Amino acid sequence: MSRLLHVSSGPYAPPVPARELTITSADGARLHVEVHGPERAPAVVLVHGWTCSTAFWAAQIRALAPDHRVIAYDQRGHGRSPASRVCSTEALADDLEAVLAATLAPGERAVIAGHSMGGMTVMAAAERERFRANAAAVLLCSTGSSRLVAESTVVPIRAGRLRTWLTRHILGSRAPLGPVTPLARRILKYATMGAGSAPHMVEACARIVHACPRTVRHTWSHVLSLLDLDHGVRQLQAPTAVVVGAQDRLTPPVHARALVAALPRCVGLTELPGLGHMTPVEAPELVTGKIRELVTAYAPEEPVKEGA
Protein backbone atom coordinates (compact mmCIF):
# COMPACT_ATOMS: atom_id res chain seq x y z
CA MET A 1 0.00 0.00 0.00
CA SER A 2 1.29 3.44 -0.86
CA ARG A 3 2.41 5.57 2.04
CA LEU A 4 0.64 8.47 0.28
CA LEU A 5 -2.55 7.11 1.83
CA HIS A 6 -1.14 7.88 5.26
CA VAL A 7 -0.06 11.08 6.97
CA SER A 8 3.33 12.25 5.71
CA SER A 9 4.67 14.22 8.69
CA GLY A 10 4.45 14.31 12.48
CA PRO A 11 4.31 11.47 15.03
CA TYR A 12 1.79 9.44 13.01
CA ALA A 13 3.80 9.39 9.77
CA PRO A 14 5.04 5.81 9.24
CA PRO A 15 8.81 5.64 9.90
CA VAL A 16 11.09 4.11 7.27
CA PRO A 17 12.08 0.59 8.42
CA ALA A 18 15.66 -0.63 8.70
CA ARG A 19 14.59 -3.56 6.54
CA GLU A 20 11.48 -5.07 4.99
CA LEU A 21 10.61 -8.72 4.51
CA THR A 22 7.96 -10.71 2.71
CA ILE A 23 7.33 -13.95 4.54
CA THR A 24 5.05 -16.89 3.78
CA SER A 25 2.50 -18.23 6.25
CA ALA A 26 1.43 -21.86 6.65
CA ASP A 27 -1.18 -21.71 3.87
CA GLY A 28 1.01 -19.77 1.45
CA ALA A 29 -0.33 -16.30 2.32
CA ARG A 30 2.32 -13.60 1.93
CA LEU A 31 2.87 -11.08 4.72
CA HIS A 32 4.62 -7.72 4.64
CA VAL A 33 6.96 -7.31 7.63
CA GLU A 34 8.95 -4.29 8.78
CA VAL A 35 11.90 -4.31 11.19
CA HIS A 36 13.00 -1.10 12.90
CA GLY A 37 15.87 -0.39 15.28
CA PRO A 38 19.19 -2.04 16.19
CA GLU A 39 19.53 -5.78 15.63
CA ARG A 40 20.79 -6.65 19.14
CA ALA A 41 18.20 -4.62 21.03
CA PRO A 42 15.27 -6.14 22.97
CA ALA A 43 12.55 -7.28 20.57
CA VAL A 44 9.00 -5.94 20.42
CA VAL A 45 6.37 -7.36 18.02
CA LEU A 46 3.38 -5.16 17.13
CA VAL A 47 0.15 -6.66 15.76
CA HIS A 48 -2.44 -4.21 14.40
CA GLY A 49 -6.21 -4.49 14.33
CA TRP A 50 -9.07 -4.81 11.86
CA THR A 51 -8.89 -2.38 8.90
CA CYS A 52 -5.49 -1.04 10.02
CA SER A 53 -1.84 -1.60 9.00
CA THR A 54 1.70 -1.16 10.29
CA ALA A 55 1.10 2.60 9.98
CA PHE A 56 -1.21 2.37 13.00
CA TRP A 57 1.83 1.79 15.22
CA ALA A 58 3.81 4.76 13.86
CA ALA A 59 4.06 6.57 17.20
CA GLN A 60 5.19 3.45 19.07
CA ILE A 61 7.72 2.52 16.38
CA ARG A 62 9.15 6.03 16.34
CA ALA A 63 9.53 6.09 20.15
CA LEU A 64 10.82 2.55 20.63
CA ALA A 65 13.12 2.06 17.63
CA PRO A 66 16.14 3.95 19.05
CA ASP A 67 16.68 1.26 21.70
CA HIS A 68 14.43 -1.66 20.68
CA ARG A 69 14.17 -3.93 17.65
CA VAL A 70 10.58 -3.30 16.64
CA ILE A 71 8.86 -5.79 14.34
CA ALA A 72 5.52 -4.85 12.78
CA TYR A 73 3.58 -6.65 10.07
CA ASP A 74 0.46 -6.18 8.00
CA GLN A 75 -2.21 -8.75 8.78
CA ARG A 76 -3.36 -10.72 5.73
CA GLY A 77 -5.41 -8.51 3.41
CA HIS A 78 -4.34 -5.36 5.21
CA GLY A 79 -1.70 -2.81 4.28
CA ARG A 80 0.80 -4.38 1.92
CA SER A 81 -0.11 -8.00 2.70
CA PRO A 82 -2.25 -9.41 -0.14
CA ALA A 83 -5.75 -10.68 0.58
CA SER A 84 -6.15 -14.40 1.14
CA ARG A 85 -9.08 -16.71 0.57
CA VAL A 86 -8.53 -18.04 4.09
CA CYS A 87 -9.79 -15.72 6.83
CA SER A 88 -9.96 -17.24 10.29
CA THR A 89 -8.48 -16.91 13.75
CA GLU A 90 -6.40 -20.02 13.03
CA ALA A 91 -4.91 -18.24 10.02
CA LEU A 92 -4.12 -15.19 12.19
CA ALA A 93 -2.29 -17.48 14.63
CA ASP A 94 -0.40 -19.12 11.75
CA ASP A 95 0.65 -15.68 10.50
CA LEU A 96 1.94 -14.55 13.89
CA GLU A 97 3.93 -17.78 14.26
CA ALA A 98 5.42 -17.26 10.79
CA VAL A 99 6.47 -13.71 11.70
CA LEU A 100 8.07 -14.87 14.95
CA ALA A 101 9.93 -17.65 13.14
CA ALA A 102 11.27 -15.28 10.47
CA THR A 103 12.34 -12.42 12.72
CA LEU A 104 13.43 -13.83 16.09
CA ALA A 105 16.54 -15.88 16.75
CA PRO A 106 16.18 -19.36 18.27
CA GLY A 107 15.28 -18.93 21.92
CA GLU A 108 14.77 -15.17 21.61
CA ARG A 109 11.83 -13.77 23.51
CA ALA A 110 9.88 -10.62 22.70
CA VAL A 111 7.16 -8.46 24.14
CA ILE A 112 4.14 -8.87 21.86
CA ALA A 113 1.55 -6.08 21.72
CA GLY A 114 -1.78 -6.55 19.97
CA HIS A 115 -4.49 -3.98 19.35
CA SER A 116 -8.10 -5.05 18.72
CA MET A 117 -7.92 -7.89 16.14
CA GLY A 118 -4.19 -7.97 16.87
CA GLY A 119 -4.99 -8.87 20.47
CA MET A 120 -7.33 -11.54 19.18
CA THR A 121 -4.46 -12.85 17.06
CA VAL A 122 -2.41 -13.23 20.23
CA MET A 123 -5.25 -15.07 21.98
CA ALA A 124 -5.65 -17.39 18.98
CA ALA A 125 -1.93 -18.23 19.12
CA ALA A 126 -1.78 -18.64 22.89
CA GLU A 127 -1.52 -22.43 22.81
CA ARG A 128 0.97 -22.56 19.92
CA GLU A 129 4.42 -23.91 20.80
CA ARG A 130 6.36 -21.19 18.98
CA PHE A 131 4.28 -18.41 20.48
CA ARG A 132 4.85 -19.72 23.98
CA ALA A 133 8.58 -20.05 23.33
CA ASN A 134 8.90 -16.50 21.97
CA ALA A 135 6.43 -14.50 24.10
CA ALA A 136 8.18 -12.93 27.08
CA ALA A 137 5.14 -10.78 27.88
CA VAL A 138 2.01 -9.47 26.19
CA LEU A 139 0.13 -6.18 25.98
CA LEU A 140 -3.53 -6.39 24.97
CA CYS A 141 -4.98 -3.04 23.84
CA SER A 142 -8.68 -2.42 23.25
CA THR A 143 -9.67 -6.00 22.54
CA GLY A 144 -11.99 -8.82 23.54
CA SER A 145 -12.31 -12.57 23.21
CA SER A 146 -16.01 -13.11 22.40
CA ARG A 147 -19.46 -11.44 22.11
CA LEU A 148 -17.98 -8.51 20.20
CA VAL A 149 -21.18 -7.56 18.38
CA ALA A 150 -23.49 -8.11 21.34
CA GLU A 151 -21.37 -5.95 23.66
CA SER A 152 -20.60 -3.16 21.18
CA THR A 153 -22.19 0.21 21.93
CA VAL A 154 -21.65 1.76 18.49
CA VAL A 155 -25.45 1.74 18.07
CA PRO A 156 -26.71 3.92 20.98
CA ILE A 157 -29.75 1.90 22.01
CA ARG A 158 -30.48 -0.64 24.75
CA ALA A 159 -28.65 -3.96 24.49
CA GLY A 160 -30.66 -6.70 22.85
CA ARG A 161 -31.39 -8.45 19.58
CA LEU A 162 -32.17 -5.25 17.68
CA ARG A 163 -28.91 -3.57 18.68
CA THR A 164 -26.95 -6.72 17.87
CA TRP A 165 -28.61 -6.99 14.44
CA LEU A 166 -27.98 -3.33 13.61
CA THR A 167 -24.38 -3.47 14.83
CA ARG A 168 -23.61 -6.58 12.78
CA HIS A 169 -24.98 -4.97 9.62
CA ILE A 170 -23.24 -1.63 10.17
CA LEU A 171 -19.83 -3.08 10.95
CA GLY A 172 -20.18 -5.73 8.25
CA SER A 173 -21.32 -3.35 5.53
CA ARG A 174 -19.94 -3.89 2.01
CA ALA A 175 -20.28 -0.19 1.21
CA PRO A 176 -17.07 1.64 0.29
CA LEU A 177 -15.85 4.17 2.83
CA GLY A 178 -14.85 6.59 0.10
CA PRO A 179 -12.53 9.57 0.52
CA VAL A 180 -11.60 11.03 3.90
CA THR A 181 -14.09 13.88 4.17
CA PRO A 182 -15.15 15.95 7.19
CA LEU A 183 -18.25 13.76 7.54
CA ALA A 184 -16.14 10.60 7.31
CA ARG A 185 -13.88 11.90 10.06
CA ARG A 186 -16.84 12.63 12.31
CA ILE A 187 -18.29 9.15 11.79
CA LEU A 188 -14.97 7.42 12.42
CA LYS A 189 -14.32 9.53 15.51
CA TYR A 190 -17.73 8.71 16.96
CA ALA A 191 -17.36 4.97 16.34
CA THR A 192 -13.73 4.46 17.30
CA MET A 193 -12.29 7.36 19.31
CA GLY A 194 -12.91 9.44 22.40
CA ALA A 195 -14.73 12.75 22.16
CA GLY A 196 -11.59 14.71 22.99
CA SER A 197 -9.31 13.06 20.42
CA ALA A 198 -7.22 15.67 18.61
CA PRO A 199 -7.87 16.32 14.89
CA HIS A 200 -4.45 15.00 13.84
CA MET A 201 -5.21 11.70 15.62
CA VAL A 202 -8.57 11.41 13.87
CA GLU A 203 -6.94 12.21 10.53
CA ALA A 204 -4.29 9.53 10.98
CA CYS A 205 -6.86 6.86 11.89
CA ALA A 206 -9.22 7.87 9.09
CA ARG A 207 -6.50 7.61 6.45
CA ILE A 208 -5.43 4.19 7.70
CA VAL A 209 -8.96 2.74 8.00
CA HIS A 210 -10.18 4.17 4.66
CA ALA A 211 -7.20 2.56 2.93
CA CYS A 212 -8.43 -0.93 3.84
CA PRO A 213 -10.19 -2.63 0.87
CA ARG A 214 -13.91 -2.97 1.50
CA THR A 215 -13.90 -6.71 0.67
CA VAL A 216 -11.23 -7.26 3.33
CA ARG A 217 -13.16 -5.14 5.82
CA HIS A 218 -16.36 -7.09 5.17
CA THR A 219 -14.77 -10.55 5.25
CA TRP A 220 -12.97 -10.01 8.52
CA SER A 221 -16.03 -8.40 10.10
CA HIS A 222 -17.81 -11.73 9.65
CA VAL A 223 -14.95 -13.59 11.37
CA LEU A 224 -15.00 -11.13 14.27
CA SER A 225 -18.78 -11.32 14.66
CA LEU A 226 -18.45 -15.06 15.35
CA LEU A 227 -15.36 -14.77 17.53
CA ASP A 228 -14.95 -17.07 20.52
CA LEU A 229 -11.43 -17.09 21.94
CA ASP A 230 -12.33 -17.43 25.61
CA HIS A 231 -10.35 -20.67 25.79
CA GLY A 232 -7.31 -18.93 24.28
CA VAL A 233 -7.36 -16.29 27.01
CA ARG A 234 -7.18 -18.98 29.68
CA GLN A 235 -4.18 -20.52 27.88
CA LEU A 236 -2.22 -17.26 27.60
CA GLN A 237 0.57 -18.06 30.04
CA ALA A 238 2.82 -15.04 29.44
CA PRO A 239 2.57 -12.07 31.83
CA THR A 240 -0.13 -9.90 30.25
CA ALA A 241 -1.13 -6.27 30.74
CA VAL A 242 -4.46 -4.92 29.49
CA VAL A 243 -5.31 -1.40 28.31
CA VAL A 244 -8.77 -0.06 27.36
CA GLY A 245 -10.39 3.29 26.72
CA ALA A 246 -13.34 4.03 28.98
CA GLN A 247 -15.29 5.35 25.95
CA ASP A 248 -14.44 2.40 23.69
CA ARG A 249 -17.59 1.56 21.71
CA LEU A 250 -16.17 -1.34 19.68
CA THR A 251 -14.67 -3.31 22.58
CA PRO A 252 -16.06 -1.65 25.73
CA PRO A 253 -14.33 -2.05 29.11
CA VAL A 254 -16.54 -5.06 29.93
CA HIS A 255 -14.24 -7.04 27.62
CA ALA A 256 -11.06 -5.85 29.32
CA ARG A 257 -12.45 -6.77 32.74
CA ALA A 258 -13.39 -10.23 31.46
CA LEU A 259 -9.86 -10.69 30.12
CA VAL A 260 -8.36 -9.70 33.46
CA ALA A 261 -10.57 -12.21 35.26
CA ALA A 262 -9.60 -15.04 32.89
CA LEU A 263 -5.89 -14.42 32.26
CA PRO A 264 -3.57 -16.76 34.20
CA ARG A 265 -0.91 -14.05 34.69
CA CYS A 266 -2.51 -10.63 34.39
CA VAL A 267 -0.06 -7.91 35.47
CA GLY A 268 -2.41 -4.96 35.35
CA LEU A 269 -5.49 -3.30 33.87
CA THR A 270 -5.39 0.33 32.75
CA GLU A 271 -8.69 2.04 31.93
CA LEU A 272 -8.19 5.40 30.23
CA PRO A 273 -10.91 8.00 30.89
CA GLY A 274 -12.15 9.85 27.82
CA LEU A 275 -10.46 7.58 25.30
CA GLY A 276 -11.99 5.29 22.71
CA HIS A 277 -10.93 2.20 20.79
CA MET A 278 -7.77 3.53 19.12
CA THR A 279 -5.64 3.62 22.27
CA PRO A 280 -2.17 3.39 20.62
CA VAL A 281 -3.04 6.53 18.62
CA GLU A 282 -5.08 8.32 21.28
CA ALA A 283 -2.60 7.65 24.12
CA PRO A 284 0.70 6.98 22.33
CA GLU A 285 3.01 7.78 25.26
CA LEU A 286 1.06 5.62 27.68
CA VAL A 287 0.93 2.60 25.36
CA THR A 288 4.62 2.99 24.54
CA GLY A 289 5.35 3.25 28.26
CA LYS A 290 3.46 0.02 28.96
CA ILE A 291 5.53 -1.76 26.31
CA ARG A 292 8.74 -0.40 27.84
CA GLU A 293 7.66 -1.56 31.30
CA LEU A 294 7.05 -5.08 30.02
CA VAL A 295 10.41 -5.16 28.24
CA THR A 296 12.22 -3.99 31.38
CA ALA A 297 10.44 -6.52 33.59
CA TYR A 298 10.37 -9.57 31.33
CA ALA A 299 12.61 -9.13 28.26
CA PRO A 300 15.66 -7.03 29.13
CA GLU A 301 18.54 -6.90 26.68
CA GLU A 302 20.84 -9.88 27.07
CA PRO A 303 24.54 -9.03 27.37
CA VAL A 304 26.56 -9.75 24.25
CA LYS A 305 29.02 -12.58 24.82
CA GLU A 306 32.68 -11.89 24.18
CA GLY A 307 33.77 -13.01 20.73
CA ALA A 308 30.17 -13.01 19.48
Image: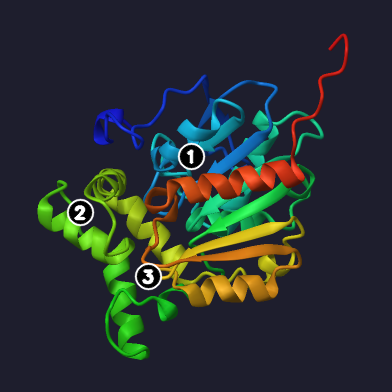
Q: Residue at x 77, y 34 (%)?
A: 108
Judged from the image, the secondary structure of the residue bearing numbered disc 2 is loop
Q: Quarter of the image holding residue 277?
A: bottom left
Reading the chain from its start, which is encountered first: label 1 or label 2?
A: 1
Question: Which amino acid type is marked by label 3?
Answer: Gln
- From the viewer's perspective, tell me whether residue 214 is left or right of residue 113: left
In the figure, 71 relative to 39: above or below?
A: below
Q: Nearer the viewer, residue 239 or 286?
A: 286
Judged from the image, the secondary structure of the residue bearing numbered disc 3 is loop
Reading the chain from its start, which is encountered first: label 1 or label 3?
A: 1
Question: Which residue corresponds to mark 1?
Answer: 60
Question: Which amino acid type is marked by label 2?
Answer: Leu
Q: Nearer the viewer, residue 303 or 107?
A: 303
Indicate the position of residue 250 as horizontal and vertical percent values: 39, 68
Question: Which residue corresponds to mark 2?
Answer: 177
Question: Which residue corresponds to mark 3?
Answer: 247
Disc 2 residue crowd, few under 14, some 14–19, many 20+, Cα 10 Å: some
Disc 3 residue crowd, few under 14, some 14–19, many 20+, Cα 10 Å: many
Question: Which amino acid type is marked by label 1?
Answer: Gln
